Amino acid sequence: MSQSDNNKETEQIFADIYSKHYSELCIYAMRFLKDEDEAEEIVQEIIFKLWEQREQLEAVNSLRSYLYRSVHNRCLNYIKHQLHKDRYSDKAFIEMKKLELESAEDYNNKELEEKVHSAISELPDRCKEVFQLSRFEGKKNKEISEHLGISVKAVEANITRALSALRESLDKYLKVELIVLLAVFFRNLM
């Protein structure tokens, strides 16, 4: 038998293997993958690999068992690879969200600081002065009282008035910011 005849015979054998086993192997792969395109690709790869290694075919006792085992192993490897890929993409997604939240937090802290200073600037002069001495310079009520020449009760009343005004001014802002942050966070999860 000539080399050409031998090649034609080998090609015919593989054409027969392909036509006989391809569909059933794809159905078998689909049981694992639930993805028709990926199942077909895996089966094609296995048959092509079989063609490339046709010289070692003599060592195969049962071609059908060999093909099924190859599809089985290749599908499991594919699933394992997808799980690792998904795990890393989930990890990357979480890290990305952390970075987004941190940058949003930095922005929100600056914006909150601006809102606080704006709210303080709207306080009456004496109230603002008492509040700044108390909160920013860390002075005690008695020290503020002596420094400004007012009673401790007046210092306490001014601090209470300042805190109340700040709370009212910032309460609306903080509620809106919380709602916006939650909306952005949940939208990105979808």
Image (spheres, rainbow, N blue to C red):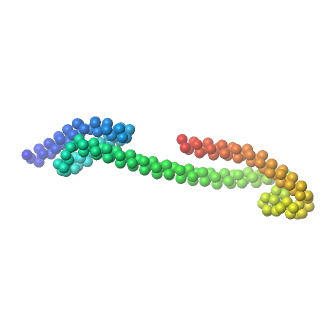
The percent position of residue 45, horizontal first and vertical second, equals 29, 45
Q: Nearer the viewer, residue 82 or 96?
A: 82
Q: Residue at x 78, y 46 (%)?
A: 168
- In the rendered image, residue 109, in percent from the top left (x then y), is placed at 68, 53
Q: Quadrant of residue 132?
A: bottom right
Quarter holding the C terminus is top right
**183 displayed left or right of 175:** left
9 with respect to 42 (left or right): left
Q: Which residue is found at the position 39% from the left and 49% from the top?
A: 81
- x then y, percent, for residue 30: 35, 38
Number of numbered discs present? 0
For residue 75, say whether it is visible.
Answer: yes
Asked if residue 44 can be seen in this view, the reply is: no
To which quarter of the image does residue 71 belong? top left
- Point 36% across, 40% down: residue: 32
For image coordinates 20% across by 42% down, the residue present is 14
Q: From what the image shows, is residue 35 above or below residue 122?
A: above
Residue placed most toward the observer, 138 or 66: 66
Q: Percent position (x, y) of residue 40?
A: 32, 40
Asked whether 40 or 110 is in front, the reply is 40
- Left-right relation of 125 to 69: right
Left or right of 76 in this view: 171: right
